[in-house]
Image (cartoon, rainbow, N blue to C red):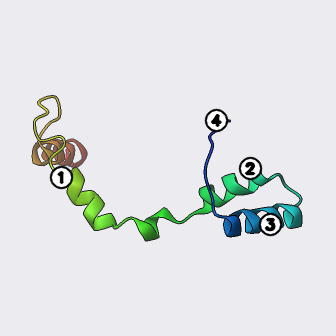
Amino acid sequence: MLQTQISISKTAYKKLALLSAKLGKKENEVANLAILNYQFDKVINKKEFLKKGKGIWADRVDIPDSNELRNSWEREFNG
């Protein structure tokens, strides 16, 4: 497991300490679980995220055109 150092408020630290005592786990385990269970999809605007990725493969020549690829699959499956 990787290690890092973070700064948190006194309030957050108190909550972390209480929760770790209640769960019987170390503070770093509770912090790790909190991060893993954080719902990033509610924070990140999915549509905006997709817009940022638009065109990242536009200049690639090793990837076939999607229409050509689909047509070849249809020919293959339809005989």
| Dot 3: element | helix
Does the residue at mark 2 contact the one at mark 4 (Cβ under 8 Å)? no
Say which of 65 and 22 sits in front.
22
27 lies left or right of 70: right
Question: What residue is shown with label 3?
Answer: 19
The amino acid at mark 2 is Asn
Q: Which mark is residue 54?
A: 1
Distance, label 1 to label 4, CA atoms, is 32 Å
Distance, label 1 to label 3, CA atoms, is 42 Å
Distance, label 2 to label 4, CA atoms, is 11 Å
Query: Compared to 11, does 52 lie above or below?
Result: above
Q: Earlier in the sequence, mark 3 or mark 2?
A: 3
36 lies left or right of 40: right
Residue 27, position in %: x, y?
Answer: 78, 54
Does the residue at mark 2 contact the one at mark 1 (Cβ under 8 Å)? no
| Dot 1: element | loop
